[in-house]
Amino acid sequence: MRLLHLLPLILAPQLVAQAAPPPVFTSVLATGPFGLPTEARLVDWSLVNEAPDTQVVRVTVWQLNLLGPKSKTSTGSVLLRLAPGGTIHDANPVGTSRSLRAGAYYEVIVEMNDRRVLPAVEVWSDNQGTVIAGTRIGPTQFRDLAH
């Protein structure tokens, strides 16, 4: 009976939750550098999952510091699960007090395990999805950095 008070101490190590390992991705796709024109208001990335199963994907928007290393924007990385046929987008605001700035250079990196997840990036001139001509980066324009 005296040992019952020690039971929580004996079981405690087994009850500690293990952190999930970070995902491992087989494909890394990049837009390459793109600049934002003065009329840019939003940079919108989007994904569609054409694979038959749910996919884990990570999207990171990087600011390119032309005289130094690139750095993650304030939006950071987005890790998500995308169901078959599922779509998602994220419109990142552009402006002097926003996460992105006109006149600066950026890159979008998409990490995935199935190339049937199709990415795109567009630069919008307003909040209604008006794409600035020549700024769309479609799925076939992304470069595969893993191969």
Image (spheres, grey):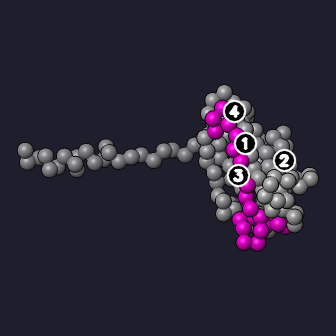
Do the CB atoms of the residues marked 4 and 2 lie less than 8 Å apart? no
For the magenta stretch, what is the residue range? 82-105
User: Looking at the image, is mark 4 or mark 2 earlier in the sequence?
Assistant: 4
Identity of the residue drawn at 67% across and 40% down: 112
Alpha-carbon neighbours of circle 1 within 10 Å: few (<14), some, or many (≥20)? many
Distance Cα–Cα, label 3 vs label 2? 15 Å
Distance Cα–Cα, label 3 vs label 4? 17 Å
Residue corresponding to mark 4: 85
Residue 127 is situated, as x and y percent measured from the top left of the image, at 78, 58
Distance Cα–Cα, label 4 vs label 2? 21 Å
Amino acid carrying label 1: it is Leu
Report the mark closest to the observer, 4 or 1: 4
Residue corresponding to mark 3: 90
Residue 38 is situated, as x and y percent measured from the top left of the image, at 87, 66
Report the mark closest to the observer, 4 or 2: 4
Amino acid carrying label 2: it is Ile
Assess whether residue 92 is covered by the magenta stretch.
Answer: yes
Distance Cα–Cα, label 4 vs label 1? 10 Å
Distance Cα–Cα, label 3 vs label 1? 9 Å
Residue corresponding to mark 2: 137
Magenta segment main secondary structure: loop
Please say whether residue 8 is visible from this viewpoint: yes
Distance Cα–Cα, label 1 vs label 2? 12 Å
Q: Secondary structure at mark 2?
A: loop
